[in-house]
Image (cartoon, grey):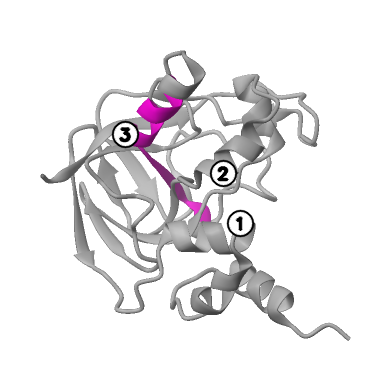
C-alpha cells in the first residue's frame, strides 16, 4: 500500500500558559487546511510557531505523525484525536513513521523531505491535551513521529503520495533514536552510526557515553 498525506495542518495562535512554557503562545494547535501548502526550507508557509528557540528550524521544518498511531491514542484516552492534534504538519497514512531511517528521503507532492529526528514531548503538549502524565505515557509508547528537513521546496496537499526515494544503509530509525535518548541508553552507540542525525542529538549521545571520572 502506498503511503499518503492524510492531512496538511497549520498551527493557529494558542495562548499556552501551561507549566514550563516560557513564551505564552504556542502553535501546537494545528488544523487541517484545504488545498496544497508551500513547504520551504524554514517550514510550512502559514504555520505559526510560538517558541522558536525549541521549535522549527532547518532540522525541524516539518513534523509528521501517523494516523494509525493517533488512532491508538484516541482509543487509549477514550476521545477523538483529529488530524493536527499532535501538533503535526503532516498527518500520514500507511507510512511507518517510527521505522523511518534517519536521513531517509521522502518525495511528497513536489517537495523532497528528509527524516532527521524524533519529536520530544514537552509540557506544552501535555497542557494542550489536558493530560498531566502525557509525557510519561507518550515516552513509554515510543511512537514519537518524525521531524523532517526540506531538501527541495515544493507544494504538498492532502492525498499526495509519500514515496521513499532513498534510504541510508545504516538503518538507524526514528524509533531507535527516541528509545536511545529516553528509555534505552545502551542504544546510544548505534545512534552515532546515523549519518544525517542532527548535531544536537549526536552531542547529547556523546556526553552520555563519555567516561565519568
Q: Which residue is mark 3?
A: 68
Q: Position of residue 50 (x, y in %)?
A: 65, 36
| 23, 196: nearer the viewer | 196
Please name whichever residue, 30 or 74, is drawn nearer the observer in this view of the structure. Answer: 74
Helix, strand or loop at mark 1: loop
For the residue pair 39 and 4, the one nearer the viewer reads as 4
Mark nearer the N terminus (3 vs 2) = 3
Q: From the image, tell me which residue sits under label 1.
A: 183
From the viewer's perspective, tell me whether residue 57 is left or right of residue 78: right
* Circle nearer the viewer, 1 or 3: 1
Q: Is residue 40 magenta?
A: no
Q: For this view, does 19 lie left or right of residue 111?
A: right
How far apart marks 2 and 1 lie (CA) works out to 8 Å
- Using a 10 Å C-alpha cutoff, classify the residue at mark 2 as few (fewer than 14 neighbours), some (14 to 19) or many (20 or more): few
Q: Which residues are magenta?
A: 60-74
- Residue at the location (49% across, 32% down)? 86
Q: CA distance from mark 3 to mark 2?
A: 17 Å
Q: Are marks 2 and 1 in contact (CB under 8 Å)?
A: yes
Residue depicted at 80% across the width and 30% down the height: 19
Residue beneath disc 2: 140
Q: Quadrant of the C terminus?
A: bottom right
Where residue 85 sits: x, y (%)? 47, 26
Seen as rendered, the residue at the extreme top is 79
Determine whether label 3 and label 2 are within 8 Å by CB: no
Instruction: Establish if 66 lies above or below 175.
Output: above
Q: Is residue 8 left or right of residue 119?
A: left
On the question of residue 19 being in view, the answer is yes
Sequence-wise first label, 1 or 3 = 3
State which quadrant residue 91 falls in.
top left
Q: Dot 3, how many residues are within 10 Å of its Cα: few (below 14), some (14-19), or many (20+)?
A: some
Amino acid at each position: 500500500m502506498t503511503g499518503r498525506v492524510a492531512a496538511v495542518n497549520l498551527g493557529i495562535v494558542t495562548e499556552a500558559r501551561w507549566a514550563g512554557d516560557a513564551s505564552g503562545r504556542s502553535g501546537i494547535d494545528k488544523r487541517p487546511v484545504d488545498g496544497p501548502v508551500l513547504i520551504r526550507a524554514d517550514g510550512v508557509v502559514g504555520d505559526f510557531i510560538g517558541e522558536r528557540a525549541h521549535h522549527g528550524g532547518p532540522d525541524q521544518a516539518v513534523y509528521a505523525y501517523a494516523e494509525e498511531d493517533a488512532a491508538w491514542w484516541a482509543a487509549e484516552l477514550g476521545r477523538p484525536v483529529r488530524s493536527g492534534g499532535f501538533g503535526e504538519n503532516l498527518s500520514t497514512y500507511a507510512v511507518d513513521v517510527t521505522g523511518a531511517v534517519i536521513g531517509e528521503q521522502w518525495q511528497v507532492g513536489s517537495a523532497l523531505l528528509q527524516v532527521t529526528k524524533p519529536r520530544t514531548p514537552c509540557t506544552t503538549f501535555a497542557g494542550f491535551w489536558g493530560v498531566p502524565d502525557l509525557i510519561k505515557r507518550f515516552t513509554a509508547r515510543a511512537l514519537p513521529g518524525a521531524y523532517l528537513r526540506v531538501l527541495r521546496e515544493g507544494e504538498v496537499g492532502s492525498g499526495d503520495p509519500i514515496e521513499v526515494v532513498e534510504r541510508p544503509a545504516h538503518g538507524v530509525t526514528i524509533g531507535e533514536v527516541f528509545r536511545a535518548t529516553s528509555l534505552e541508553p545502551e542504544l546510544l552507540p548505534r545512534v552515532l552510526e546515523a549519518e544525517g542525525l542532527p548535531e544536537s542529538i549526536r552531542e547529547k549521545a556523546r556526553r552520555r557515553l563519555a567516561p565519568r571520572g
